[in-house]
Image (tube, helix red, strand yellow):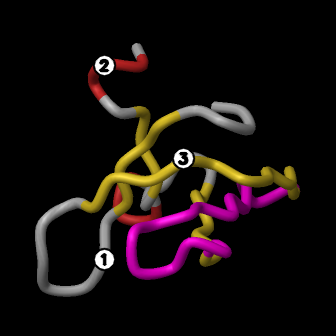
């Protein structure tokens, strides 16, 4: 996934929320994504852990695949 891709994010206790990637930063343990959501248009950071299904919070929006 890259900047401007439409994605959904997993948040506590609710349905997945749509957003747009504003920035992405790779680390050894995974990738950090800055995602603009309706409630957070300036972005909020989500971390996808490498090889950890429970640690994947950002996924491509179905229409972007």
- Under circle 3, the secondary element is loop
Q: Are marks 3 and 2 in contact (CB under 8 Å)?
A: no
Q: Quadrant of the N terminus?
A: top right
Q: Which of label 2 and label 1 is nearer to you?
A: 2
Q: Quadrant of residue 41?
A: bottom right
Query: Label 1 crowding class (10 Å Cα cut-off): few <14, some 14-19, many 20+?
Result: few
The Cα atoms of the two marked residues, 2 and 1, are separated by: 20 Å
The residue that disc 1 covers is 11
Q: Nearer the viewer, residue 52 or 11?
A: 11
Residue at 87% of width from left, 57% of height from top? 27
Q: Quadrant of the C terminus?
A: top left
Residue 29, x across and y down, in percent: 76, 60
Q: Is residue 59 above or below residue 42?
A: above
Q: Which of label 1 and label 3 is nearer to you?
A: 1
The disc placed on residue 53 is: none
Q: Earlier in the sequence, mark 2 or mark 1?
A: 1
Residue 50, x across and y down, in percent: 62, 50
Residue at 60% of width from left, 77% of height from top? 44
The residue that disc 3 covers is 51
Residue 20, x across and y down, in percent: 54, 48
The residue that disc 2 covers is 63
Q: Which residues are magenta?
A: 28-43
The Cα atoms of the two marked residues, 1 and 3, are separated by: 19 Å
Q: Is residue 8 above or below residue 39?
A: above
Q: Nearer the viewer, residue 44 or 26?
A: 44
The Cα atoms of the two marked residues, 3 and 2, are separated by: 24 Å
Q: Quadrant of residue 62?
A: top left
Q: Is residue 58 left or right of residue 34?
A: left
Query: Label 3 crowding class (10 Å Cα cut-off): few <14, some 14-19, many 20+?
Result: few
């Amino acid at each position: 996934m890259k900047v401007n891709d439409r994605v959904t994010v997993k948040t506590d206790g609710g349905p997945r929320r749509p957003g747009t990637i504003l920035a992405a930063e790779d680390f050894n343990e995974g990738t950090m994504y800055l995602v603009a959501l309706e409630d957070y248009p300036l972005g909020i950071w989500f971390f996808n852990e490498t090889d950890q299904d429970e640690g994947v919070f950002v996924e491509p929006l179905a229409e972007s695949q």
